[in-house]
Image (cartoon, rainbow, N blue to C red):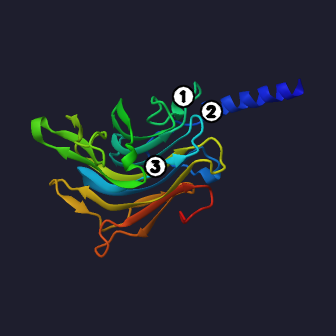
């Protein structure tokens, strides 16, 4: 009887704990580190440029050991100072329960335990997203991912990737007609929601290369400057193997989620 009572008490505490955690999916500068006991963990870097878009060659590497209501993402984004944004990247989701609430990942409405390409748009109070399973041919490879603007038929924004599978999501572009076109920031992010702080979510190292941004003339410019601000919590880990410069345009950024103490993504 005592064991049953104790089990019930632990379950109640777990449910109470889930309810009071802040919303996980937020593209703001309030970041949290798993190694300090938080559930919501981010490593990211941000450039401050008035821009029309961003692109990078991103490592498409799946995260393993995703538990219920846990998720992991790598994405690029364009953002402004009032919370509008477009995110484009990859997402791995566990199975979601009734307790997921605001902790859910962007692809929480999918079957779970899959790796997805996704986009998410936030314009004022309107949020849209799409998630499609990453083709097998892309897993373990690197994929060019781009957020940009267009001017035809009234203009808007688009996201596009270069997959090894012609049926992949947004291979020929996904378009947001009439969307905001000018942004103040671009960001590269690795992010996770983990309920157990024991390094149970594992995403092997990958290198983000050839970072570019689109200026207000529509020209794509290879990065030659470091992040304006960055947050390197562990996990995830994120650091420059080779910082962007005139000698090494685009740079080589490495990230991973391999437990709480691995700073080198070995």
Furthest-bottom residue in this view: 247
Q: Are marks 1 and 2 in contact (CB under 8 Å)?
A: yes
User: What crowding class fits label 1: few (fewer than 14 Cα within 10 Å), some (14-19), or many (20 or more)?
Assistant: some
Can you give x and y, in whole percent of width and height, for residue 183 in the image? 27, 48
Name which quarter of the figure residue 235 lies in.
bottom right
Furthest-right residue in this view: 1
Q: Are marks 3 and 1 in contact (CB under 8 Å)?
A: no
Quadrant in which the N terminus is drawn: top right
Work out whether residue 111 or residue 124 is closer to the camera in this orientation and state it.
Answer: 111
Can you give x and y, in whole percent of width and height, for residue 100 in the image? 56, 30
Q: CA distance from mark 3 to mark 1?
A: 22 Å
Residue 9's place in the image compared with 90, above or below, is above
Residue 112's place in the image compared with 260, above or below, is above
Say which residue label 1 marks.
101
Q: Residue at x 46, y 49 (%)?
A: 29
Say which residue label 3 marks.
29
Q: Earlier in the sequence, mark 1 or mark 2?
A: 2
The residue mark sitting in front, 3 or 1, is: 1
Question: Could you tell me if residue 30 is visible in this image?
Answer: no
User: What crowding class fits label 2: few (fewer than 14 Cα within 10 Å), some (14-19), or many (20 or more)?
Assistant: some
User: What crowding class fits label 3: few (fewer than 14 Cα within 10 Å), some (14-19), or many (20 or more)?
Assistant: few
Q: Residue at x 14, y 54 (%)?
A: 217
Q: Which mark is residue 18?
A: 2
Name which quarter of the figure residue 179 lies in.
top left
Q: CA distance from mark 1 to mark 2?
A: 9 Å
């Amino acid at each position: 009887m005592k064991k049953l009572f104790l089990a019930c008490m632990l379950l109640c505490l777990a449910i109470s704990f889930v309810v009071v955690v802040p919303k996980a999916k937020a593209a703001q500068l309030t970041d949290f580190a798993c190694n300090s006991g938080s559930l919501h963990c981010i490593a990211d870097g941000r450039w401050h440029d008035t821009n029309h878009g961003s692109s990078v060659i991103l490592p498409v590497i799946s995260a393993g050991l995703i538990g219920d209501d846990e998720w992991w993402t790598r994405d690029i984004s364009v953002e402004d100072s009032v919370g509008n944004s477009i995110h484009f990247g990859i997402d791995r989701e566990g199975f979601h329960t009734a307790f997921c609430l605001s902790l859910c990942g962007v692809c929480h409405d999918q079957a779970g335990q899959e790796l997805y390409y996704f986009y998410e748009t936030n314009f004022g109070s309107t949020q849209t997203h799409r998630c499609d399973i990453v083709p097998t041919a892309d897993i373990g490879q690197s994929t060019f991912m781009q957020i940009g603007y267009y001017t035809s038929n009234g203009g808007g924004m688009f996201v596009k990737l270069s997959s090894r599978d012609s049926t992949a999501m947004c291979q020929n572009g996904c378009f947001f007609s009439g969307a905001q076109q000018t942004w103040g920031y671009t960001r590269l992010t690795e992010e996770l929601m983990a309920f157990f702080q024991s390094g149970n979510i594992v995403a092997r190292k990958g290198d983000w290369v050839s970072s570019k941004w689109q200026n207000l003339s529509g020209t794509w410019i290879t990065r030659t400057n470091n992040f304006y601000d960055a947050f390197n919590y562990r996990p995830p880990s994120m650091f420059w193997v080779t910082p962007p410069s005139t000698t090494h345009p685009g740079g080589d950024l490495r990230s991973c989620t391999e437990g709480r103490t691995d700073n080198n993504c070995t």
